Image (cartoon, rainbow, N blue to C red):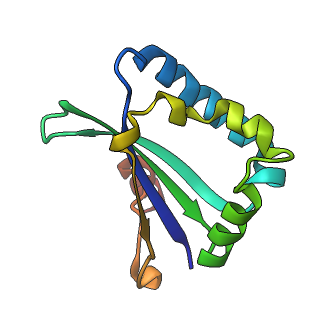
Amino acid sequence: MSFIEYETWRIAAGNEAEHHQMIRDWFAFVRTHHADLFAEWKSAKYFRQTDYDGKSSGTYIMLFEFHSLEGHHAYKERRKDWSGPYEAYKKVDPYALFEPNSVVTEYWEPQEENLWFEFEPTENRRKND
């Protein structure tokens, strides 16, 4: 069963361009080092919070999906002091560009995953009918 870490933040004033580049650098680093540093991760997804009409609230969101709760804890324990190979990871970690008091971390444990579904794009469904 997956385990999800949900983090939100606001960008510190004047750091917007640097933040957006750092997020791109962060994703590139994680993609390159996934097998050796982030094996417990199932996915990482990045969002900007908006209202119903798409207007930004100024809050950004990252969803980290781990293969399990135990995997989440093992990863956090291994990375806790940013030593060894995680020293390089710390250099692309964008937290320095966040408003410190805006960071919120929550955890979600999926339920009834056997009931979940994803829809295929409409054009694919028509081809398969």
- Quarter of the image for residue 69 reads bottom right
Horizontal and vertical percent for residue 34? 76, 49
- Residue drawn at 78 percent across, 35 percent down: 88
- Residue drawn at 48 percent across, 24 percent down: 19
Please give left or right for residue 39 compared with residue 65 in the image. Answer: right
Please give left or right for residue 126 compared with residue 3 in the image. Answer: left
Above/below status of 121 relative to 11: below
In depth, the one of 103 and 58 nearer the eye is 103
Horizontal and vertical percent for residue 5? 49, 61
Please give left or right for residue 20 compared with residue 61 in the image. Answer: right
- Residue drawn at 84 percent across, 44 percent down: 85
- Residue drawn at 44 percent across, 67 percent down: 107
Q: Quadrant of the N terminus?
A: bottom right
Above/below status of 69 relative to 24: below
Q: How many marks?
A: 0
In depth, the one of 99 and 16 nearer the eye is 99
Please give left or right for residue 80 compared with residue 58 in the image. Answer: right
Q: Quadrant of the C terminus?
A: bottom left
- Quarter of the image for residue 90 reads top right
Horizontal and vertical percent for residue 13? 34, 20
Above/below status of 51 relative to 106: above
In depth, the one of 25 and 100 nearer the eye is 100
Above/below status of 98 relative to 5: above
Horizontal and vertical percent for residue 14? 38, 14
